Image: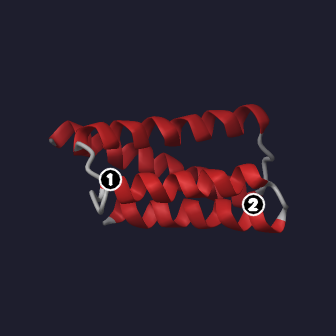
Amino acid sequence: LSIFVCILITAGIHLYLGVTAHLPVFSINAIGYVVLGIAYANVGIPAPHNTTCIVLLVYTALTIVLWLLFGAHTLIAYIDKIVEVLIVGLLWYTQRID
């Protein structure tokens, strides 16, 4: 459940930034999080859970790296990165106990 809450938070932040700043890349990133979150929950998307977990982990890590390289270092960005680090950590932990 905590992974889904984090996914919803980061997707919401990216969607907010995409709409308010008129930057479609943020909206696309939000859609990616929602689609991967649905796949992770196996709701309507037949995907192996282990594979989906790894893809979501890599997607989130890539988002963090791209922000480090190109992103604005604002308060909302730092809050979002904390949430994304939580996603990576929780997914990593989930992979270890499976």
Residue drawn at x 66%, y 59% is 14
Residue linked to disc 1: 40
Q: Position of residue 46 (x, y in %)?
A: 26, 50
Residue linked to disc 2: 18
Q: Position of residue 17 (x, y in %)?
A: 75, 62
Q: Position of residue 31 (x, y in %)?
A: 57, 57
Residue drawn at x 30%, y 61% is 44
Judge from the rendering whether residue 37 lies leftward or rightward of residue 19; answer left or right: left
| Residue type, mark 1 in image | Tyr
| Residue type, mark 2 in image | Gly
Q: How much space separates mark 2 and mark 1, taking CA atoms? A: 24 Å
Mark with earlier residue (2, 1): 2
Residue drawn at x 52%, y 37% is 61
Q: Quadrant of the N terminus?
A: bottom left
Q: Is residue 75 above or below residue 93?
A: below
On the image, which quarter does residue 62 sit in?
A: top right
Q: Specify the farthest residue to the left.
A: 98
Q: Quadrant of the C terminus?
A: top left
Quick one: label 1, few (<14), some, or many (20+) residues within 10 Å? many
Rendered image coloring scheme: secondary structure
